[in-house]
């Protein structure tokens, strides 16, 4: 069975494990997290990232928050005259933007870790794929963080830029591929349809599974094989 979840934004690792147990997730199943594990809440997602380092049947796809963290790797350097001089106004602007988007908690928790563990996390994030294609329940799926900017049905996935896949803001009327269903997060479903607050949003060609965990809602785990959803408290 293939499961997907997205935009956990500091959700506690133990609660994620309980949600997986509720769904009978086992070593024979696979979990795709569609980006944005980090920032905003709790431990900033560091617990889940450390779990992912050794999880044999789980993959994190790159989200825009992971991309912002990668651009701020310099903040973990030892402070010396040389490293301080290398912090340009451009880098400071990038860091300020990341902090404004909830990155302060993640940086704070990263600083508590041994340098080797910090390096392991950054190396893991650098290898996160932008998308995955899978088959489940006899259907084909494209999994990615944010949907598509500048979408065309005849455009190859490899032709999209990173920003077009991690910063897209779909409209409810957007349509993607007819023969492959697209699953993404990034845009809270309530911003597309207020009636979906706390729940996923399905259309003919795509499903949005960002249910607003960043704002206090419980995340939804979607099993692709049968379309069943799992959520703590429900």
Image (tube, rainbow, N blue to C red):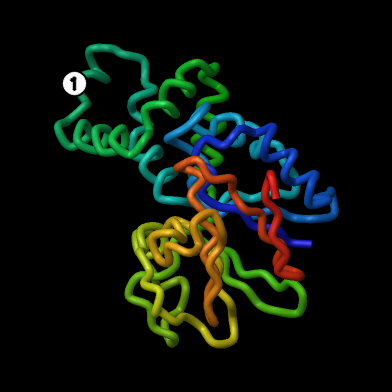
Q: Label 1's element?
A: helix
Left or right: 186 in relation to 136: left
At x 45%, y 71%, the residue is 158
Asked if residue 181 is positioned above or below residue 101 in the image, the reply reads below
Which one is in front, 121 or 197? 197
Residue found farthest to the top? 80
Binning the other alpha carbons within 10 Å of mark 1 as few (below 14), some (14 to 19) or many (20 upward) gives few
Residue found farthest to the left? 89
Asked which quadrant contains residue 178, the reply is bottom right
Asked if residue 180 is positioned above or below residue 131 in the image, the reply reads below
Which one is in front, 50 or 119? 50
The residue pinned by badge 1 equals 85
Residue 79: x and y, percent? Answer: 31, 13
Residue 65: x and y, percent? Answer: 41, 44
At x 64%, y 55%, the residue is 32
Asked which quadrant contains residue 167, the reply is bottom left
At x 52%, y 38%, the residue is 123
Left or right: 56 in relation to 193: right
Asked if residue 120 is positioned above or below residue 184 in the image, the reply reads above
At x 61%, y 32%, the residue is 12
Which one is in front, 29 or 220? 220
Residue found farthest to the front? 195
């Amino acid at each position: 069975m293939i499961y997907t979840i997205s935009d956990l934004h500091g959700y506690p690792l133990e609660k994620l494990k309980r949600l997986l147990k509720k769904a009978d997730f086992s070593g024979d199943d696979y979990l795709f997290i569609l980006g944005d594990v980090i920032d905003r809440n709790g431990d900033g997602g560091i617990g889940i990232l450390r779990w992912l380092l050794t999880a044999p049947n789980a993959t994190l796809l790159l989200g825009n928050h992971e991309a912002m963290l990668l651009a701020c790797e310099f903040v973990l350097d030892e402070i010396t005259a040389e490293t301080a001089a290398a912090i340009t106004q451009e880098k400071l602007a990038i860091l300020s933007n990341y902090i404004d988007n909830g990155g302060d908690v993640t940086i704070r928790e990263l600083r508590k870790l041994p340098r080797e563990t910090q390096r392991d996390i950054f190396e893991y994030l650098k290898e996160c794929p932008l998308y995955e294609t899978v088959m489940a329940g006899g259907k084909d799926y494209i999994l990615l963080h944010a949907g598509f900017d500048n979408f065309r049905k005849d455009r190859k996935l490899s032709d999209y830029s990173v920003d077009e896949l991690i910063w897209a803001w779909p409209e409810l009327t957007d349509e993607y591929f007819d023969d492959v269903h697209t699953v993404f997060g990034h845009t809270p479903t309530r911003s597309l349809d207020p009636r979906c607050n706390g729940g996923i949003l399905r259309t003919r060609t795509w499903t949005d599974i960002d249910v607003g965990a960043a704002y206090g809602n419980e995340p939804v785990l979607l099993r692709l094989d049968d379309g069943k959803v799992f959520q703590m408290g429900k």
